[in-house]
Each structure stands twice: as structure tokens, then as C-alpha cells.
Amino acid sequence: MRSRIEQDGSISIYYGDRRLLWGIYPGIDGHPVRVQALEYTENEMIWKTVQGEIHCRIVPEQGNGLELNFSLCGWQERIHTFFLLYEAETTAEGFYQAAEGMGHETGYYTEEELAARRNTASYGLCALRCRDCAVTLYAKPSSPEEFWYETVFELDVREREKYTNGWSKAEKAAELRLSCGARLEQAHGSEVKFAPLRVLATDTIEEGLERAAQDIGDGLKARRKMPPAYHWCSWYYCYQNFDRDQLREYLSGLKTLKREVPIRYVQIDAGYFPAVGDWLMTNERFPDGLAEAFAEIVEAGYQPGIWIGPFMVGNRSQLYREHPDWVLHDLDEKPVQAWIMDNEPKVWGYQDEVYYILDTSHPEAMAYMRRVFRTLRSMGAVMFKTDFMLWGLQDSTRVKRYTPGKTSVEYFRDFLKMIREEIGEESYWLGCIAPFLPFVGYADGMRIGGDVGSSWDGTFGPQNMMRCLVGNNYINHHYFQTDADAVMLRDFHIRLSEREIYSLALLAAMAGSCIYTSDPLHLLSEERLALFEFVRPDERRRKPRLPFLEEKRTEIVMVQQEENRALLYVLNPSQEQGVYTYNLNALGFDRDWKAYHISTGEQEELWHGNLVLSIPPHGCALLLLSKEQEVQVKRGNLWENLE
């Protein structure tokens, strides 16, 4: 990979002799900069303007990569968004979009899909499928202290007329323009040094995404030391109605199980507080407080966990009544209303008509939340699920903070730093409804898709989760552990079929995700308890390959591989019977590998070197692939088959 500075002051990037990106030129607040003079050498470009100078130092790397190091020098005006690239051109044939946070759009889009979308935003990184290679672009902070703004890539697709033979119209062609903006939110001054923008060429998009995520995680000191979470959570069966009596029933029930379930945490979710924001006050569900509940969890042999929505403040809470100045206000001095609940349904059964956002720039509000987390930790909680975290990432130019002067990411990470200080390094922290990148270095796990429920169809069906699990696979164990949401196991009060329950449980396991359930384990059948044990995560961080990441397929295909053994998982999420044919080479294997069905242990015969699978609607196939002559399939735990 190499670069060239053009006479018009732009930069072009080549892979061999092929031009990948050209017209690389800075912009400010939606416009290209107006340059008075240019200075450049072979590896540095300086754009001189009336407001100041923009520098770009180009650093070639060994292998197929380079860095663009941008900085502002002597800048005279405040900037909301500085564009490191402003509408650079590319001939990419596909684009990979990284989600900002939980449930957001992510995945690979073909050129035709991009044309239909017109504009696609990607957070922190993006990847282009070019003819000869995949190109991944990402901002890489060298340390956590350098991460104080949000970087967004935007791909715009425009139609233009192509002409041939003079003025004869031929056809319409798509023109792809890529921008990369750093959101400064007018919070930083005349001297600004940006995190290096890395441009990396690889054979596949998956390889580029993995290397970028590893690089970003290293720079932000991602937490990769905690074993994968395996726990029980009260939400997805009891919801906000869980109380002290049910806790005692469930803990007692666990002692009666013939089959030991080695979960680590028992986590109490929403509903234990009298009003949203009054986290340390008790209500009728836990009249003796959380300390007693945590003590009973410990006595039963488990570690206590707790849910909390740190940025949430209900209008009926004591917190808001006594401290209305602790919430964020808009530019008209009115409290920012994150939720309006003055009609049906009332969230979690609380009476609050409005939910506000805590202003963590207020020192007293920050001190209050510090006391909340310190108290919960002192009570015994060692697992924390923080929810609705995206509420805290508010553009600093659109709200009035008590203490102004920082970007939304700076305020957000200040708050996360405080939480980690109070819960301690030994606590497991799961983020939810959260922006991904600002959490790197603080969270151990992260929800990636929307809530799942008791049926395949409808609002709480698994469709969003499945798309997000595949789309965010590259961040798993690089940023934090991904959380596919609860595994449904029960065969009562549920509309998922046995086939669907089995397919979704194996999907979460094969993805290398956190594994937990909310079902009453003591009321489950032996078969469902065996399934929960089968999907129990390995202590090692397991991460699948996605061999068809750049193809549009109805099925989901994942491969977990060791040297001489591999697991192949294929899910048919459609409503139709699926017949899928795979060449072993396309899956990453040669013809010496043999395939065995995990459920039966029977060998699957190849057809002309191809693996042919017939899978019913919402069903899956799980196979063990091996080069060994004799193979024994193990059904106690999934990961024993790779040992």
C-alpha cells in the first residue's frame, strides 16, 4: 500500500497499481476547507487557511497498511466536526458498517444495497470490498486518554450519467464518496492532534475487521481477563416483578437439582427500587434491602449481581424532587426528556410521566452516583449490569451541562471511569443499550442486540439479535465479550418451539457469547438443563469464523476451529426448508476432513467433495469436523469436542 500527494492538495492511496481512495481532503462542519496555500513533502501535507493550518503526516507501515496523522495548528474557530476525509472517492464494490451500539444497523452491504440506502454511517471503523483486496479504515487511539471524540465514517452513493461517443448517454453509474468525521463538539481549541487514521489492506473483510478490533482494543486497554459470563438474571421470566420471596424460592430450588448448574452470578434486574433514580432506597419487593438479598445469594454459593440505569431519573423520584438541577437541560433551559410516559404503557409499572437524564458534569450528581456504586459494591454486588447507557452520550452543543467544556465522549468516559473505580477491578461489568467504543477498557461484556422474548415473531423475536450477533462478531473478545441476550430454556409459558430453543441456544454458544438464562432452573426438565450445560461457555475465549461474511445468504454459518478439530454451525432463520451445499475449501478445510453430526454422532458423507445439509425452518445443524481417524462425539458440553 502506498500514497501519493496530488497537485490539487489531495491525497491518493494505492494498492499496488490500483487506486483505492482518492480525493482525500479535509473538511469542517460539512464543507471542504478553503485553502490559501499548500506545503507538502513526500510524506506530509499542510493545508493553510485563514483560520489556521491542517497537517497530515503519512506514515507507511511494513506490510499492507499506512497511517494518516492529522492535526490542527493555530486554529482560530471552534469546530463541531472535523473531517479527516471529506467525500473521498472510491470504486468499492461493497461496504461493511460498524454499529454505534446495541441493536443498531451493522453488516456487509453490496453495491446495489448501498445505492438503495444512499447514506450509510459506520462508527469507529469501516471496511471496503475492492476488486483486489479488502480495505479497513479505523481511528486508533494510542491510549485511553486520547479517546475523547467520536469518529464516524459515512459512505454516500450518488448517481451520475455516463457518456460515450461525445454526448450520447450510456447509463447511470454509482459514485461512492467516503467521509470520516471526528466530533469535537466545539470543545477543543486551536491545537488538536487526532488519533491516527489507519488504512489496512487484507485479503478479506473479516481479517481486516479482526485486526482493527484487536488494535483498537489494545490501544484502549480492553478488559479481556474475565472468564465468559455464565449466570442467571431475573428479567426475562419475572421481569420487574421479581422479589425477595421468589429469590429465596429460586435459590432453594437450585439446591434440589440432581444436575449441578455451575452458574457464577445471580443477578437481580429492574424493580427493586421505589422510583427510577432512587437506587439505594427499598420498596415492597425487597423490604429488607439488597444487602440481605446479596447475603442470601452468597450463602447459596453464588455471586450477587445487580441491574441499574445510572443516567435515568424519573420525575416522581426523590432524586428529582430534591435536585432538579442535577439533570441535563436543553439550550432553552428545560430538562431534556429522554422518555415521555404520560400514556399507556407505563414502563416497569412506575408512575413517572417523564424520564430525565442525569447530568454527570454536576459534581454533586457525580458524587451521588459514586456513592450508589460504592454502596452496592460494599453490600456485596460483584456483577453490574448498567442499562440505557446511550442516554449519557449527548452532543455537548445540543445540551446545557452544569460544567461545560468537554465532548460527549469525555463526559461519558469520565463517568465510566468513576464506576469502574467504585466497583473494583474484580467486578464483572455488563453494558446494555450502550455505545460500543466509549465502553472499551471499562466493560467486560456488552449486549449487542435487542431484547429477545418468548416467541420467534413479533417485537421481541430474535431477528435483530441474530443480525447484530453476526455483524458485531469482530468485536467479541477484542473490545469485550458480546452478549446475545438470555437463552430461553423453559417448556412452559413460551411460544418458541423446541427446535427454535435449541437453535438459538446453540447460536449464542457458537458465537462465543455470554451465556445466561432467566428461566426457573429448578422447574426445567432434565433435557433443558442438559442443554444449558451443553452451551456453558469455555473458560477460554472462543470466537468463530464467518466464512461467508461478504455474501448475501439466508443462513448463518459459523466455524469454531482448533488445529485438527472444528465445529460447524448452520442456522436456517427462514420460514422455508433450506438445502445448503458447501465446498469444504470454502469453509476453510481440505477433503481430508470428515463431518459428524453432534446430535447423533453419525458421519455425514460428502457429495463430490461437498457437504450437503437439509435444515428445516428455524432449525440448525451442528457438526464436528475432524482429520482424525477415530472420533467420539461428546454431548456433555459443546467445547469438549474441540479438546
Image: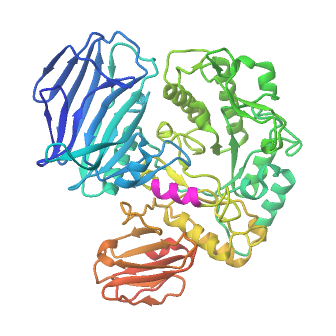
Q: Residue at x 61, y 73 (%)?
A: 502
State the image coordinates of residue 99 (x, y, percent, origin top left). Answer: 47, 45
Taking depth in this image into account, of 81 and 277 the one nearest to the observer is 81
For the image shown, how many numbered marks are present on the structure? Answer: 0
The residue shown at (65%, 15%) is 332
Instruction: Tell me where residue 310 sits by quadrant.
Output: top right
Q: For residue 196, say whether it is visible.
A: no
Q: Quadrant of residue 153?
A: top left
Which residue is depicted at the point 56% across and 49% down? 103
Quarter assignment of residue 347: top right
* Location of the N terminus (image quadrant): top left
166 lies left or right of 627: left
Above or below for 508 versus 272: below
Residue at 40 percent of width and 74 percent of height: 566
Q: Is residue 44 magenta?
A: no
User: How far across and down, in percent of the image, does residue 610 sit?
Assistant: 34, 83
Q: Position of residue 30 (x, y in %)?
A: 38, 25
In the rendered structure, the answer to whether residue 220 lies left or right of residue 271 reads: left
- Comparing 626 with 79, the one in front is 79
Position in image of residue 296 (x %, y %):
79, 52
**Residue 468 lies in the magenta-colored region:** yes
On screen, residue 562 above or below 203 = below
Q: Quadrant of the C terminus?
A: bottom left
Q: Is residue 270 above or below residue 422?
A: below
Q: Nearer the viewer, residue 247 or 389?
A: 389
Taking the image as drawn, is residue 339 in sight?
A: yes
**Viewer-proximal residue, 518 or 225?**
518
Magenta portion: prevailing SS class? helix
Report the span colored magenta: 463-471
Q: How is the image coloured?
A: rainbow
For this orientation, the residue located farthest to the front is 168
